[in-house]
Image (cartoon, helix red, strand yellow):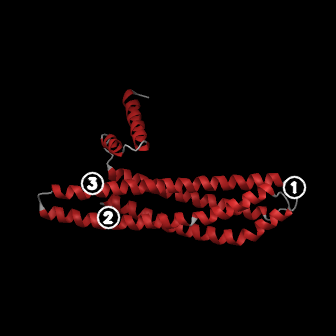
Amino acid sequence: MDFKRTFACSLILVALTLAMSGCQSAYYKTMESFGYHKRDILVSNVEKARESQEEASEQFKSALEKFSALTGFHGGDLQEVYERLNDEFEDSEAAAQKVTKRINAVEDVGNDLFDEWKDELAQYTNKKLRNESRVKLSKTKSKFKRLVSAMRRAEKKIDPVLDVFRDQVLYLKHNLNAQAIASLKSELNTLEADIGRLIKEMQKSIDEADAFIKELKKS
């Protein structure tokens, strides 16, 4: 790796460290030195949030398949059944946490971008350009709010699924018997319905993300 590339990677790591430590202004300043402004960072964050929702949808589909398969248990090692179900639950929980983290990042950068945009309106001397920028700000902000609302609606559908999943994993952990398997069967319809609603809302959110990214890149 040459010196320039090594130096660039080092500065990006510094920027990420500043972001994680809460030094947003220093983070933005460092990223701007590379030509990445808040708009670019917002697009990147929305793309990452969309990806995390796609990954979460696939994980919950996988979890439902494993859950459904385990209800047909007719003998064998119940400890192994518990471990498989627990693995799926932990993967689902991790996917959910990633979704929330990514949505938070989208909101943070979006709000910072719009605050900066609003402040910069006062710097115009040309009234026509100022008004055009103000209108553009209003439209973009409205689309952003719709995007975040869609993301948060999808996020809220996650907890009911995790709650049911967690209950079943905990019950199975301490009741490795046929009664525990019967409990899994009784909750299968609930999980199917909840995960169906979750995936539907996730897809709406993903579609909103695609539309917002397209609009932001076009402007």
Q: Which mark is residue 76?
A: 1
| Relative depth, front residue between 207 and 12 | 12
Whether residue 78 appears in this view of the structure is: yes
How far apart marks 2 and 3 lie (CA) works out to 13 Å
Residue 182: % across, % down: 81, 67
Q: Quadrant of residue 6?
A: top left
Along the polypeptide, which appears first: circle 3 or circle 1? 1
For badge 3, the amino acid type reads: Glu
Q: On the picture, is 196 further left or further right than 115?
A: right
Reading the image, the residue beneath label 3 is 116
For badge 2, the amino acid type reads: Thr
Of all residues, the one furthest to the right in this rendering is: 75
Total marks shown come to 3
Residue 30: % across, % down: 33, 40
Residue 206: % across, % down: 48, 63
Q: On the picture, is 45 further left or further right than 184?
A: left
Reading the image, the residue beneath label 2 is 140
Q: On the picture, is 175 further left or further right than 102?
A: right
Element class at badge 2: helix
For badge 1, the amino acid type reads: Gly
Mark 2 or 3: in front is 3
Instruction: Specify the quadrant that holds the N terminus.
Output: top left
Q: Residues within 10 Å of mark 3 (few under 14, many from 20)?
A: few
Residue 130: % across, % down: 17, 62
Element class at badge 1: loop
Q: Is residue 23 above or below residue 142?
A: above
Q: On the picture, is 88 further left or further right than 33?
A: right
Q: Residues within 10 Å of mark 2 (few under 14, many from 20)?
A: some
Q: Which mark is residue 166?
A: none
Q: Quadrant of residue 55?
A: bottom right
